[in-house]
């Protein structure tokens, strides 16, 4: 966020024991503490002071409910809420309990303007069996149909080629071609979904239209992968 000229504040949802090799343990933050943190941050900037929100790992159903409730109370503009539905880590660790997935669909997606799943996460949100690249547009349409007003960006890191797909709330669809990039830094490809969704929110806050915001966020991820 700082690199984009955006001031970010943080409400921690969970503590993790992890490295670039994988996640070993997740310890959720108690929901009352999270709620107090979010309200404290909102009070610091006043009504309308929180311009947007990027949501990542939530861990539990209780946390999902707290975050959804806070978004409604704080009046964060829906079009500037980006949800990265972190259901599993890259190493396969579960990062949102099963009950939380259902609550995310029912309570959080309706107050989010954007969702950025990878293919596996998209399948889980729609409740469909595994599909390849050719099935992405159809799954994205099904998710968008269930949650009117939702922009769906399917990230392509787990597809070949790694193309991203955008279905805008208005129905426009765009593929963003990609190519596999060798990560040069010590962190490898760890956290690329987080980087993408954060860059996407920053673009939206700075006035980018949907297609341009996705394009620039994808380019930002590539630059970060090439950073030593």
Image: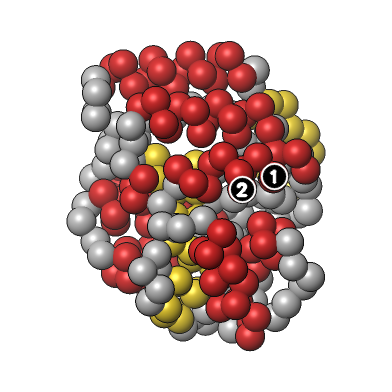
Residue depicted at 23% across the width and 45% down the height:
5
Numbered mark located on residue 150 in the image: none
Classed neighbour count for the residue bearing mark 2: other residues with Cα under 10 Å, few (<14), some (14–19), many (≥20):
some
Q: Is residue 59 above or below residue 186?
A: above
Tell which of 185 and 94 is nearer to you.
94
Quarter of the image with the N terminus is: top left
Residue depicted at 41% across the width and 79% down the height:
174
What percent of the width, then of the height, locates residue 137?
56, 78
Residue depicted at 45% across the width and 27% down the height:
70
Say if residue 79 shows up in the picture.
yes
Mark 2 = which residue? 105
Say if residue 18 shows up in the picture.
no
Q: Residue 166 vs residue 63: left or right?
A: left
Classed neighbour count for the residue bearing mark 1: other residues with Cα under 10 Å, few (<14), some (14–19), many (≥20):
some
**Circle 1 sits in a helix, a strand or a loop, which is it?**
helix
Outermost residue toward the left? Answer: 207
Q: In this view, does 49 lie above or below 206?
A: above
- Alpha carbons under labels 1 and 2: distance apart: 5 Å
**Circle 2 sits in a helix, a strand or a loop, which is it?**
helix
What percent of the width, then of the height, locates residue 88?
71, 50
What percent of the width, then of the height, locates residue 198?
42, 50
What percent of the width, then of the height, locates residue 185?
53, 58
Mark 1 = which residue? 102
Residue depicted at 73% across the width and 32% down the height:
26
Task: State if disc 2 and disc 1 touch (CB < 8 Å).
Answer: yes
């Amino acid at each position: 966020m700082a690199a984009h000229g955006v001031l970010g504040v943080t409400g921690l949802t969970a503590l993790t024991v992890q490295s670039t090799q994988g996640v070993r343990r997740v310890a959720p933050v108690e929901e009352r503490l999270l709620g107090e943190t979010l309200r404290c941050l909102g009070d610091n900037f006043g009504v309308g002071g929180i311009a947007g929100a990027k949501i990542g790992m939530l861990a539990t159903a209780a946390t999902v409910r707290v975050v959804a409730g806070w978004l409604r109370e704080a009046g964060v503009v829906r079009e500037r809420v980006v949800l990265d539905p972190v259901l599993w880590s890259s190493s396969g660790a579960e990062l949102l309990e099963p009950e939380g997935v259902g609550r995310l669909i029912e309570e959080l997606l309706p107050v989010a303007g954007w969702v950025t799943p990878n293919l596996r996460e998209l399948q889980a949100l729609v409740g469909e069996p595994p599909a390849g690249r050719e099935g992405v547009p159809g799954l994205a349409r099904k998710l968008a149909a269930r949650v009117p007003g939702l922009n769906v960006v399917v990230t392509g890191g787990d597809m070949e080629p790694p193309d991203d797909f955008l279905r805008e709330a208005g129905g426009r669809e765009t593929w963003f071609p990609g190519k596999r990039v060798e990560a040069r830094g010590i962190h490898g490809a760890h956290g690329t979904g987080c980087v993408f969704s954060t860059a996407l929110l920053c673009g939206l806050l700075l006035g980018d239209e949907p297609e341009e915001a996705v394009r620039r966020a994808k380019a930002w991820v590539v630059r970060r992968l090439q950073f030593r």
